[in-house]
């Protein structure tokens, strides 16, 4: 017990020290940018020492979100000081995102089938489903309004100029309500999985789970046991892939800074602050009232979502966070 308290106090003291040192280093770089009183040969070792302390802190913490945040700092440093190397690191981030995408379809299928077919009362499953849909649409609608309000008030991101040598985005055609409705339902589940159509996989899994629940125990048991095993395997698969997350995240940040320059982060600070302001408003105005109404443990909730949130923020992709969130 004493050893645990000592380690906790040690980590807390190191956290405060790192925060103070980070502020000092940032202030030093800002002043040097304005007055140019120090050479880069002096500033670089200072950054390396600070990064070494962050790595030591991550080793003590032994938590994936900490490693992801530290890898972001390492990525910024690599992109800033070694851009000729950083511009080739995007392959690592692409590998990580590809591995994440391989998890999504089988994990969704297995968890939904087990959740529906493994339940003895389909009426109760239906009640849970419509309550979840009501919550999803209610919270999503409020989040959209908050986000639109925040970005229209601050006009954040207007100073960022996109590079001209980026890959061409695929052309998007306007869809009618019929097209959107047809897009929900799969014509070939293998094609839906290959194209990453998550909503189509969800619809197929729900119908499959309901059909499996309607069978007798003799016919249902083998497929249900297979789905349970598949779900457990995919959770273990996710844990293995998550070990690669810090490398993938760090490579993505290094590539961005190396290709577009450190200014992309400086210009994006206002945008990020707007994002966090909107998120804080969402938490205070939407999430906390819902947690109080449903008597949900807020501390445990934030502990569980910290890792998926960090992944989604660092990779700018919700797909990377979905397997861990599930």
Image (tube, helix red, strand yellow):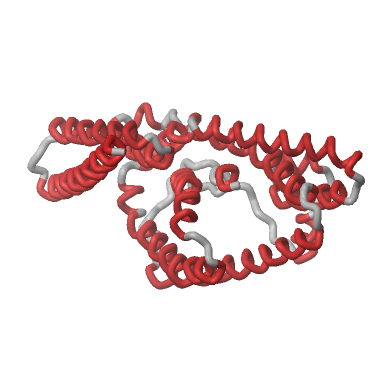
Q: Nearer the viewer, residue 54 or 47?
A: 54
- Residue 244 seen by the camera: yes
Q: Quadrant of the N terminus?
A: top left
Residue 110 at x, y percent in the picture? 73, 41
Q: Is residue 215 left or right of residue 126?
A: right
Taking the spot 80% from the left edge, 57% from the top edge, the residue there is 121
Taking the spot 37% from the left edge, 40% from the top edge, the residue there is 66
Q: Nearer the viewer, residue 124 or 256?
A: 124
Hey, which quadrant is residue 105 in on the image?
Answer: top right
Q: Is residue 301 left or right of residue 227?
A: left
Hey, which quadrant is residue 9 in on the image?
Answer: top left
Residue 75 at x, y percent in the picture? 36, 36
Which residue is most to the left? 37
Residue 132 at x, y percent in the picture? 66, 63
Residue 325 at x, y percent in the picture? 56, 47
Q: Is residue 67 left or right of residue 309?
A: left
Q: Nearer the viewer, residue 33 or 210?
A: 210
Residue 282, compared with residue 236, is above or below; it is below
Residue 201, compared with residue 245, is above or below; it is below
Q: Is residue 61 left or right of residue 123?
A: left
- Residue 254 seen by the camera: no
Q: Nearer the viewer, residue 215 or 95?
A: 215
Numbered circles on residues, count: 0
Hey, which quadrant is residue 224 in on the image?
Answer: top right
Taking the spot 51% from the left edge, 34% from the top edge, the residue there is 242
């Amino acid at each position: 017990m004493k050893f645990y308290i000592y380690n906790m106090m040690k980590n807390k003291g190191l956290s405060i020290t790192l925060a103070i040192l980070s502020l000092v280093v940032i202030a030093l770089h800002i002043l040097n940018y304005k007055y140019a009183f120090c050479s880069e040969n002096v500033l670089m070792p200072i950054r390396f020492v600070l990064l070494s302390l962050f790595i030591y802190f991550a080793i003590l913490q032994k938590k994936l979100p900490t490693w992801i945040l530290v890898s972001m700092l390492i990525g910024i440093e690599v992109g800033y000081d070694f851009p000729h190397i950083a511009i080739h690191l995007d392959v690592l981030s692409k590998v990580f995102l590809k591995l994440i995408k391989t998890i999504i379809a089988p994990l969704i299928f297995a968890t939904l089938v087990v959740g529906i077919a493994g339940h003895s009362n389909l009426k109760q499953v239906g009640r849970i489903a419509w309550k979840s849909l009501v919550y999803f649409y209610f919270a999503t609608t409020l989040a959209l309004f908050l986000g639109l309000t925040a970005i229209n008030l601050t006009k954040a991101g207007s100073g960022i100029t996109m590079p001209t040598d980026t890959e061409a985005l695929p052309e998007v055609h306007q869809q009618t309500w019929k097209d959107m409705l047809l897009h929900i339902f799969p014509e070939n589940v293998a094609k839906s999985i290959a194209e990453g159509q998550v909503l189509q996989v969800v619809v197929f899994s729900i119908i499959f789970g309901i059909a499996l629940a309607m069978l007798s125990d003799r016919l249902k048991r083998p497929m249900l046991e297979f789905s349970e095993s598949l779900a457990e395997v995919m959770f273990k698969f996710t844990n293995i892939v998550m070990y690669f997350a810090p490398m993938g995240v760090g490579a993505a940040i290094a590539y961005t800074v190396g290709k577009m320059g450190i200014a992309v982060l400086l210009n994006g600070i206002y945008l990020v602050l707007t994002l966090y302001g909107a998120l804080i408003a969402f938490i205070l105005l939407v999430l906390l009232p819902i947690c109080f109404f449903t008597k949900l443990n807020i501390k445990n909730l934030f502990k569980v979502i910290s890792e998926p949130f960090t992944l989604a923020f660092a990779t700018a992709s919700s797909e990377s966070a979905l397997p861990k969130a599930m």
